[in-house]
Image: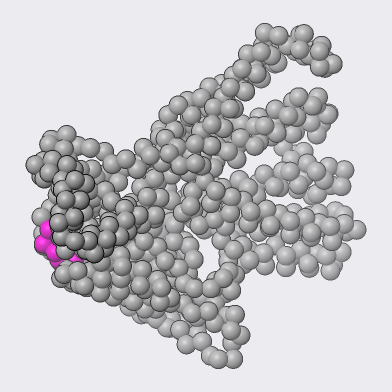
Amino acid sequence: MLVLLDLLRLPPEHLGASILLLAGIVISCEYLRVSLTPVLTRSVIAHVLVNLLSAVVLPALLAVVLVLSIAAHPDRALINLAIAGGLYVLWYLAGQSTLLVRSDTQGADLGFICIGSVITFVPGVIAFAVA
Amino acid sequence: MKETMSSPGHGHERGSEPIALPFPTMVASGASRAGTILRLLCFLTAGANMGGNALLMFAHEPLFRWLGLAQPADLYTFTSVLGFSFTSGVVALLIALRPAQAAPLLVVGMVGKGLFALVTMAFHLRSPLPWPWLAFGAWDAAFVGVFWLYLVHLSRPELLVLNRGAIVPGGDRPRTRKALLLSYSLSGNARAAVAHVEAGLRSNGYECTRVSVQPVERALFGFPFSSFWSFGRILVRAVLRRRAAIEPIDVAPDHDHDLIVIVGQTWMVGLAAPVEELFLDERTRGIFEGRDVAIINVSRGLWRRSQAMLASHVQAAGGHLIAASAHTNPGTEPFRTLSLFVFLAFGGKVPAWVPRWLRMPQSLEPWVQAQLEQLGERLALRSRVLLSAEVMARLGALDDRFARMPRRITEDTWETMVSPVVRPMAARGSGPEASA
């Protein structure tokens, strides 16, 4: 478990594994949001979770990743910002991929993704400026 | 997750024998191209996991020698890993054989394959694993995605059919040709939507009663908002699904409307609280019992969960869900979302100095309004047999061609084409109602 947590700092020696892990989390969160959306319609917990997955969970996680990685490797700040940006693209593509199997999933919600990017990149840019 | 596989609960009768509508089975069995591909992928991983692990179990020694790999150090651990992976193949086979009942198994399969992939990755980071194990891990990781997409594909099949424009058969109540239209409107969008459906219903001879739902907390749910605090409270309450009491409506449970049209909007991904209260309040819940119900959702962009909530409430209240239609405001994201917040902040009157890309209209476009009117027309002419939007359109074209044919040919054609179908149905008493 510690190995997996360490990967959240985007260590250069295990960058591929880090990106794979984060990509897996991004895709899982988006698929979880899409698959929970039409079910458990009476559940408050499911509803709160869908809301959090729409604009909070991934942006907050990626903000933590950015701040930790920039603090650990200040010289790689720009690369890490680019990786976070790439993961946002993956988030969008994961949502859109659900349209391939079901035409009424609505795919990714670009509106909330963009709002979420503020949560990620404001702390990230501040960490970059401080570092 | 049980509700994902539930049928909407209506079917038509042949004598005393109920005939289940085809769509849940049709979607679940993979009648679509995506369903077929996903099902084939399940068969593929079933074969790979079961066959591959059985082969490794009995022939790992020569196989590893041939591949130049070291023999397993601990045969017990090796066998248990093979057994785990073989079981995952059995799960995939069961999914492929009975997709309609596969939702829980898909979750089991996803967890199993996900854990296998994660453990493989963790071990590989400690000390590099031989390539076959990495390939197995990658295969399982990919199939977590495949299973998840299959789960998405199979969820709420009735909504997929309704979202394609079908109007499915309703209940057996006598047609009074009276419709009850229920809506709650904060900024006017839902009110406009219901007006267009009403126009369509009236044009085909329906008598309509429009009822506007009023929250008890009018100060809180008034628009423009009295303060930013009010807006924040509505948002937080919407996320936490807090109820919003409504004023009593003047409709008795034994009302004589054969059709109910209900319009709901999306608040924080879910159904607006005052609309949901119609189903939660004991005084109003009964009005849906046994009635044909059409649901319409209007929103900034996200309507899927609010539609599913509305549909579930209708089904739970004993209504026959016959149609669903969802519409969004115009514009492209993310400007549409930002425009919505600007619209709400300015109480609906956005000043001209605000950039145009933040002033996207928060109302339904004319073509959407026309669509809603057309939905009203189709609801008024709805049949008791399953007719998709495509069939309705084709019947319309056929009718148009008949109208332009000489009378004798028309009668002959009608006799040849339709009578063999319509007469037996009429004899059973389940023929389509000519309600125009």
In the rendered image, the quadrant that contains the C terminus of chain B is: bottom left
Q: Residue at x 65, y 32 (%)?
A: B140
- Residue B22 seen anywhere in this rendered image of the structure: yes
Q: Nearer the viewer, residue B298 or B78?
A: B298
- Residue B220 seen anywhere in this rendered image of the structure: no
Rendering coords of residue A20 (x, y %): 74, 43
Rendering coords of residue B369 (x, y %): 36, 73
Q: Tell me the chief SS of the magenta region.
A: loop
Seen from this angle, which residue lies furthest bottom?
A: B352
Q: Residue at x 53, y 79 (%)?
A: B360
Relative to A44, say whether B119 is above or below: above
Identify the image quadrant of residue B185: bottom left
Seen from this angle, which residue lies furthest right?
A: A75
Q: Nearer the viewer, residue B76 or B266?
A: B266
Identify the image quadrant of residue A120: bottom right
Q: Residue at x 19, y 45 (%)?
A: B416
Specify the segment rendered in magenta: B175-179
Rendering coords of residue B2 (x, y %): 38, 39
Indicate left or right for B103 with B276 as reference.
Answer: right
Rendering coords of residue B422 (x, y %): 16, 46
